[in-house]
Image (cartoon, grey):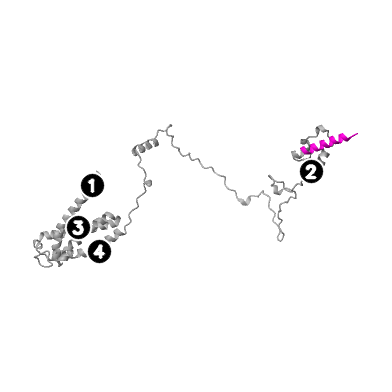
Amino acid sequence: MNLNRTGRRVLVFALVVVVGMAFRVSWNALRDIAHVIGADPTAATLYPFVVDGLMALALVAALVLVGNDRRFALKVLGTYTGASLVLNYVHGLVPALHGATVDWGRLADWDPANWALVLLATSLPVGSIYFGSDLVAKVLHHQPAPIPAPESIPAPVANAEESTETAMKRSTADLPESTPAPITAPAVTAPVRMPDPVAVGFLKSTLPLKPVPAIGSTPKRTVAATSTRPRAATGRVPGAARSPQPKRTQAQLLDEARTATANLPDAKVTAEGIRREIRTSPANARMLRDTILAERAGTAGVTP
C-alpha cells in the first residue's frame, strides 16, 4: 500500500514523538548512572545524549552507507543499544540510584560486577567520540551510486512467460522425418602385406648418372636467352607514349586529295571517298570535295 505525502508526514511525526518519549525515560536512568561514576550536574545531564545520541547517529549512517560501512554502522548501533539497555537495567535493580544515596562509584554489591559496570559506563563517552567521528567521516565521503537514465532502463517485456513458452515450443517442433539411424564406424579391414625389402647392395641403378665436373674446372652456367625483337604492346598505349603525327596544312590536304581523285569522274568524287583515302576529318573532306569539283568546273568552262 502506497502512502501519500500527508500519510508519510504523520508517520514520521509519530515516530519522532515515540523516540523522544523513549529518550526521556532512558535519559533519567543514564543521568543517575553518571552521578554515581563521578560526573558533575552538567556532565550528568549531557551523558544520555552521548549514549542514546550516538545510537541515533549510527541509525542514520546505516540508512546512508552501503557494504562494509553499513555493517560497521549497524555494529555500533547494536553495541550502544546493548550498553544503554544494561545501564537502564541496573538503574531499575538498584533503587538507591534514584535518590543518589549510594556510595560514589558503586553500581553493584558484587565487586567484579561493579567493576564491569563502572568500566562500561565510563568507556561509553570515549567510544562515542571515536565511533561518532568515524561514522561522520564515512557519511561525508560516501559517493551515492548514479541513477541510470530512463533511456538505459530496459522496458518490461509483456507476457514474458508466454514468450518463453512459445520459444520452447518452436525449438521442440516435430521433425518432418524420422530420426536417422546412428552412423556406425566402418569395419576394419585386414592390413595389406607389403613385399619384403631387397638388399640394396645387389641392385643396379638404371638411372643415368649425373656427370661430375673435374677438379679445377669451372662449371657451365645456363644463361637465359635474350630476344632482340621488341615486345608487342599489350593493351592500349597512352597518348603521351604515342609518336606525334605531323599536322598537315590545307594545301597539303588539297594536293593529296587531287592526287587521289585524279582518275575519278566528277560523279565519284565524294567526301567519304576523300576522307578514307587521305584519312582526314569529315569537315575537311567536304571542303576538299567542293574545292576539287569547283576547280574541275572552272577548268571545263575555260577549255576551247
Choose the circle earlier in sequence order: 1 or 3. Answer: 1
Question: How far apart, in angstroms, are the residues tagged by discs 4 and 1?
Answer: 39 Å
Q: Bounds of the magenta span?
A: 286-304
On the image, which quarter does residue 118 sit in? bottom left
Q: Nearer the viewer, residue 175 or 156?
A: 156
First-in-chain label (3 vs 4): 3
Label 3, label 4: how far apart the Cα atoms are: 16 Å
- Of labels 1 and 3, the one closer to you: 1
Q: Amino acid at mark 1?
A: Thr
Residue 81: numbered disc: 3
Q: Nearer the viewer, residue 61 or 204?
A: 61
Examine the rendered structure and indicate whether residue 60 appears above or below residue 231.
below
Give the labeled residue for mark 4: 130
Rendered view: 170 above or below 150: above
- Reading the image, the residue beneath label 1 is 6
- Mark pair 1, 3: CA separation: 31 Å
Circle on res. 250: 2
Q: Residues within 10 Å of mark 1 (few under 14, many from 20)?
A: few
Q: Could you tell me which residue is drawn at 19 percent across and 61 percent down?
A: 49
The type of residue carrying mark 4 is Tyr
The answer to which of marks 2 and 3 sits earlier in the sequence is 3
